[in-house]
Amino acid sequence: MKNIIPFGPQHPVLPEPIHLSLTLEDEIVIEAVPALGYVHRGLEKLADIRDFNQMIQVCERVCGICSMIHALCYCQGLEDMMKVEVPERAKFLRTIWSEIHRMHSHLLWLGLYADSFGLESLFMQFWKIRERIMDINEVTTGSRVIVSVNIIGGVRRDISAEQIRWILGELKIVEKEFIALQETMNNEYTVKKRTVGIGYLSKELAHSLGAAGAVLRGSGISQDMRQLKYAALSHLDFEPIVEYGGDCYSRGLVRFREVLQSIDLVRQAVDKLPDTEISVKVKGNPEGEVINRVEQPRGECLYYLKGNGTKFLDRVRIRTPTFANVPPLAHILPGADLASVPVIVLSIDPCISCTER
Amino acid sequence: MIENEEKVPKKELVGKVQQLISQGYRFVTISCVELDEKYFDLLYHFDKDLTLITLRVVVERGETVPSITVLLFGAFLIENETQDHFGIVFEDSVLDFGGKLYLGDDVRRTPFCKYGIKDVSKTKQESE
């Protein structure tokens, strides 16, 4: 017998609203159709009434979790269009804050993920660790979430030597506490029972459906926009983290390992931090077309920008990673048990604010 | 002009996309830009080994565009979003929300257009 049941827009595992219309046969999903539009804000359209400098603040508000990286992608695009050479120290600082954002996003997700299969203590442990990362944001930028450090031509804040020593100390504690959860997260019976072989996406399908981020790399495709060597990444050792299982477990492993990788990247960046200015003055208005891509915590983010020589841009187009991962989600849900749906949905790390902008 | 860009006539779009798929390109997204009262640019972005290429298709207001979802299911979301925002109708989409992905039943305008107001459902009826 076929039944259609609604999943969302309000659901205990969903911090943001998305609706899935699930067609079930017994308790097996045979079709999943997504419905969006609950939090659409039309931010791209604000380019008509906000000038290209004000749009930085708009881009930061596409998503709280990866706000810094949205602004970075936008600023890099305009700097490319306006032929602005950003000081080296600013590039390193951008990389440091990007990786701190990646850590706080992944830690948030790991907690929610643990909660989705009932491990509430693990949820609490991940979020407890995350507080130290939020403290780093607050101390270095004055804000825990929307850090607002990027400007066209560099960054507006520096990190002092004393702050760097404190950050390294905090990261040492974060690393130790995080590794202590490795055994539970990656080998505990319940975790494996709920995630191994669940929500399988083959390498071929991940590619053909246009998946991004951990969804792509969890299916065995070694692609991470940090390989483009933007900001200070050309000075740092970096290799994408790849898992080959294609299931929820593999996507979780990718993100778990990426937290440790981000700690390593921050240490490398701090170690090589050059002593230069942190911004340059930018004159004129943007004109032309440009595309910039960066790796957000959830995957590849693309900004297409078109300027007309005035202070208002003709077009700001933002393709976020969750937007790319909704079609793969609609594809992997059929065949799953109803009880696995929350785990599979969370395994793509959905950000609906990003998706709807 | 964007790096690695190719202008493609609308009638050759599906063939060109098929060619890119067979060469191993991954679909990234479509960007729509309203050029003036009459025309839109549709930019189809594809990636291979971190190199991004863009197909530029110029579309006249009110014209329909062949959907690429038959070849790339992953394009259904951006095609539907473009229909909502700009009123461009994609023919033969495998999952067509009929201009109501984000918008409610009572909305009769394309909110991302500077020029004119379009009734999406009317455009669709005309194309049929």
Image: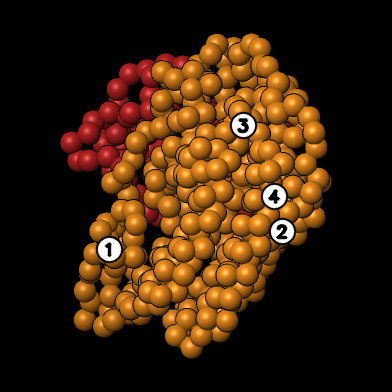
Chain colours: A orange, B red
Q: How far separated are the C-alphas under marks 4 and 2?
A: 15 Å
- The answer, for residue B11, to whether it is visible in the render is no
- Asked if labels 4 and 2 share a chain, the reply is yes
Foreground label between 2 and 1: 2
Q: Element type at marker 2?
A: helix
Q: Output the chain of dot 3.
A: A
Residue contact between numbered discs 1 and 3, judged by CB atoms under 8 Å: no
Q: How far separated are the C-alphas under marks 2 and 1?
A: 36 Å
Foreground label between 1 and 3: 3
Residue contact between numbered discs 2 and 3, judged by CB atoms under 8 Å: no
Closer to the chain start, of discs 1 and 3, is 1
Q: Element type at marker 3?
A: loop
Residue A157, labelled with which disc? 3
Query: Which part of the image, by quadrant, shows the N terminus of chain A?
Result: bottom left
Residue A165, labelled with which disc? 4
Which residue matches tag 2? A264
Q: Output the chain of dot 1.
A: A
- In this view, A329 is above or below B52: below
Q: Residue at x 68, y 54 (%)?
A: A168
Which residue matches tag 1? A11
Q: Output the chain of dot 2.
A: A
Residue contact between numbered discs 2 and 1, judged by CB atoms under 8 Å: no
**A36 displayed left or right of B24:** left
- The answer, for residue A26, to whether it is visible in the render is yes
In percent of width and height, residue A322 lies at 47, 53
| Amino acid on which disc 2 is placed | Asp
